[in-house]
Amino acid sequence: MISVIKAHLLPLIMMLGLLSCANVKQIDRGILSRRIMNHISHPEEEVFLQEVQAYREGAIGGSKAVGGGCGCN
């Protein structure tokens, strides 16, 4: 019974994955790049949270900022 469900579920998931892909026309990209479409609602807050995380971790790296936590640049 479970193998029958898996046999029908896998193609369904694959079809949904293929149908969810879409090509965006050049003229429509401006609409998608608006601020409301961005997952970060407040960029200033995101920068602050990255600084706080870097301070807590004791090192900076892997993001936009460069440098090390030991102070030996």
Image (cartoon, rainbow, N blue to C red):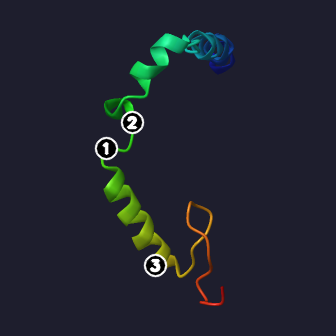
24 lies above or below 58: above
Residue shown at 61% from the left, 69% from the top: 61
- Viewer-closest of 12 and 58: 58
> Tag 3: Cα neighbours inside 10 Å, few (<14), some, or many (≥20)?
few
* Left or right: 33 in relation to 21: left
Residue shown at 54% from the left, 10% from the top: 25
The Cα atoms of the two marked residues, 2 and 1, are separated by 7 Å
Which picture quadrant has residue 35?
top left
Look at label 2 and name its amino acid.
Asn
41 lies above or below 19: below
The Cα atoms of the two marked residues, 3 and 2, are separated by 26 Å
Q: Which residue is mark 3?
A: 55
65 lies above or below 21: below
Percent of width and height locating residue 21: 59, 15
Q: Quick one: SS at disc 3?
A: helix
- Verify CB contact (< 8 Å) between mark 3 and mark 1: no
Q: Quick one: SS at disc 1?
A: loop
Q: Quick one: SS at disc 2?
A: loop
Query: Which mark is on residue 6?
Result: none
> Tag 2: Cα neighbours inside 10 Å, few (<14), some, or many (≥20)?
few
Q: Which residue is mark 2?
A: 38
Residue shown at 56% from the left, 66% from the top: 65
Look at label 3 and name its amino acid.
Tyr
Look at label 1 and name its amino acid.
Ser
- Verify CB contact (< 8 Å) between mark 2 and mark 1: yes
- Viewer-closest of 56 and 7: 56
Q: Which residue is mark 1?
A: 41
Percent of width and height locating residue 63: 58, 61
Percent of width and height locating residue 1: 63, 16
Q: Earlier in the sequence, mark 3 or mark 1?
A: 1
Residue shown at 30% from the left, 49% from the top: 42
Q: Earlier in the sequence, mark 3 or mark 2?
A: 2
